[in-house]
Amino acid sequence: MKVKKKVKTIKIDVDKCNGCRACEVICASFHAAPKYSSNNPARARIRLIRDPIRDVFVPVYAGEYTASECMGRDKYVIDGKEYDECGFCRASCPSRDVFKEPDSGLPLKCDMCEDDPSLKEPMCVQWCLAEALTYEEREEEVEEEVTLGDMELGLKSLVDKHGLQQLVDSVARMSQKG
Ligand code: SF4
Ligand code: SF4
């Protein structure tokens, strides 16, 4: 069934990014529990792929989790700058450490800063003084889909890693311990 959906995106202008990493810090801090209690960029849902010597700064925000590694690694040359392999990829995948919660290894995904009350713009966009990030909203007709929240994404990655039965057994043991 087709439904109207508000599609939220962050447009990225890599030429404007100066590598300050404010987006990483505010994202990690805003999503800390309790809010603003820590600011470890490893917990951010936006990461800066950086190579200052070659003037390469690519802010990438976390997309879907995938249990598989991609088969090919491409290089891109844009305006004389070489961007390598995973540079533009938004996936939380087994090949690299970004977009994984550092303690648990569970995948992180950008939520466009869903909050109550809602934000006027996502936090990383608000904090990017270089205006490399621009928030955009549009309405689209799309097939109805079930979107997974943080909890479901985490459980899915645990099932992929350990198998459903082991997860069920672990939860059963935990509930016995009370
Ligand atoms: S806050 Fe803006 S300029 Fe700074 S690293 Fe992030 S995207 Fe780049
Ligand atoms: S939109 Fe929010 S959750 Fe997504 S990367 Fe920016 S600060 Fe993080």
Image: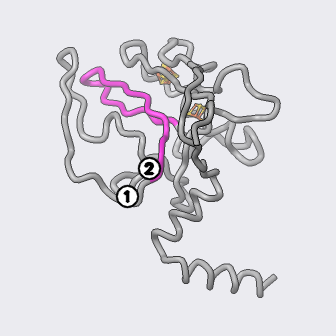
Residue named by callout 1: 94
Span colored in magenta: 46-65
Q: Which structural element holds mark 2?
A: loop
Determine the residue positioned at 59% across, 21% down. 137
User: Which amino acid is tagged 2?
Assistant: Ser
User: Which amino acid is tagged 1?
Assistant: Pro
Determine the residue positioned at 59% across, 23% down. 139
Q: Is residue 175 left or right of residue 88?
A: right
Where is residue 171? Give x, y as percent: 67, 79
Where is residue 95? Give x, y as percent: 33, 55
Q: Is residue 18 magenta?
A: no
Determine the residue positioned at 44% across, 33% down. 60
Q: How many marks?
A: 2
Residue named by callout 2: 92
Q: Is residue 61 magenta?
A: yes
Q: Is mark 1 within 8 Å of ligand 2?
A: no
Q: Which structural element holds mark 1?
A: loop
Label 2 CA crowd tier, 10 Å (few <14, some 14–19, many 20+)? many
